[in-house]
Image (cartoon, rainbow, N blue to C red):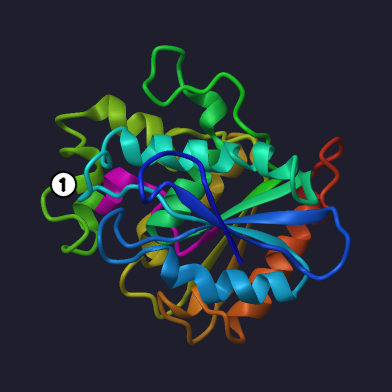
């Protein structure tokens, strides 16, 4: 494992893991959750990143300044994630990474960040989150992701959404433009193929909160595939063990195999 900084803050780094062989290797960006605050860090997803590397993927396990940390919150948390993903360009100059096959994957709040990263091309020019040339992605994988931030604020876990989402600096009535720029449900179409994995016993980020997302995304023109894991809770869908790991690998292989010039909804069935 090689830590690589993408900024001067202690939290602005990614852990690069490379499989055996010469490459170039497909890349999985791994983004941890934790309600965008102190409940998790890159250490939480390190075992999963290592397990995926053993399966043949280069992994980029991303850390970022969270909502409770200096420089985090709005807009710093989101700027960090965008810069951290774009830093793969510099890494690819030194390591055998295939930037034509990059999938961004996140768990819980990291699922929101993963889908948002795929949609950065939609940021308005006057946005604090705008990037002129965001790294193009092959797909996005959400593991029990918070894909509608307004809905989660109103109906989600209280410790994450106690009157506001701390990473946003307030609720959507105070800052509707902020939520519109980062909530995946408000950014459709995202413009990349997506896979959403849900656990049927998840009580932290249950699929039922976002029951209309799949249809809305497909109606907007996005390619979306949904996997529902039986007898799985919130953390099992992000596990380095089976059956979670197997479902993640299958989803990544599916997204990596899509021909970027000839994607179709049939390819995700």
**Residue at 22% across / 43% down in the picture?**
70
Residue 87 shows in this picture: yes
Q: Residue furthest left?
A: 163
Q: Quadrant of residue 158?
A: bottom left
Q: Quadrant of residue 219?
A: top right
Front one among 112 and 11: 11
Check the image and report above or below for 147 versus 30.
Answer: above
Identify which residue is drawn at 25% across, 44% down. 167
> Label 1 crowding class (10 Å Cα cut-off): few <14, some 14-19, many 20+?
many
Q: Residue at x 44, y 61 (%)?
A: 32
Residue 75 to residue 248: above or below: above
Which residue is at a point 40% across and 61% down the rendered structure image?
Answer: 108
Q: Is residue 144 magenta?
A: yes
Locate residue 52, reporting x and y percent: 67, 71
Percent position of residue 157, x then y? 22, 64
Check disc 1 and report its element: helix, strand or loop.
loop
Does residue 116 show up magenta in the picture? no
Picture quarter with the C terminus: bottom right
Q: Which residues are magenta?
A: 141-152
Does residue 269 appear in the picture of this structure?
Answer: no
Question: Mark 1 — residue?
Answer: 164
Query: x%, y% of residue 265?
Result: 75, 47
Q: Would residue 60 appear left or right of 81 to someone viewing this image?
A: right
């Amino acid at each position: 494992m090689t830590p690589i900084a993408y900024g001067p803050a202690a939290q602005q780094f990614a852990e690069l893991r490379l499989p055996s062989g010469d490459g170039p290797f497909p890349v999985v960006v791994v983004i941890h959750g934790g309600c965008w605050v102190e409940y998790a860090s890159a250490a939480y997803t390190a075992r999963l990143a290592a397990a995926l590397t053993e399966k043949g993927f280069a992994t980029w396990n991303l850390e970022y300044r969270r909502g409770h940390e200096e420089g985090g919150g709005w807009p710093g948390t989101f700027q960090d994630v965008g810069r951290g993903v774009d830093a793969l360009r510099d890494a690819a100059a030194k390591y055998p990474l295939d930037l034509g096959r990059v999938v961004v994957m996140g768990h819980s709040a990291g699922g929101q960040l993963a889908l948002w990263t795929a949609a950065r091309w939609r940021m308005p020019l006057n946005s604090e989150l705008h990037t002129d040339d965001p790294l193009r992605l092959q797909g996005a994988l959400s593991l029990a992701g918070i894909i509608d931030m307004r809905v989660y604020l109103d109906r989600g876990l209280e410790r994450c959404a106690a009157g506001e989402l701390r990473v946003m600096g307030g609720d959507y009535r105070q800052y509707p433009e902020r939520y519109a720029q980062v909530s995946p449900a408000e950014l459709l179409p995202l413009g990349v193929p997506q896979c959403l994995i849900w656990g049927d016993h998840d009580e932290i980020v249950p699929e039922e909160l976002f029951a209309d997302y799949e249809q809305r995304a497909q109606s907007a023109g996005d390619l979306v595939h949904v996997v529902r894991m039986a007898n799985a809770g919130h953390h099992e869908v992000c596990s380095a063990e089976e059956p979670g790991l197997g479902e993640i690998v299958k989803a990544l292989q599916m997204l990596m195999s899509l021909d970027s010039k000839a994607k179709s909804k049939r390819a995700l069935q």
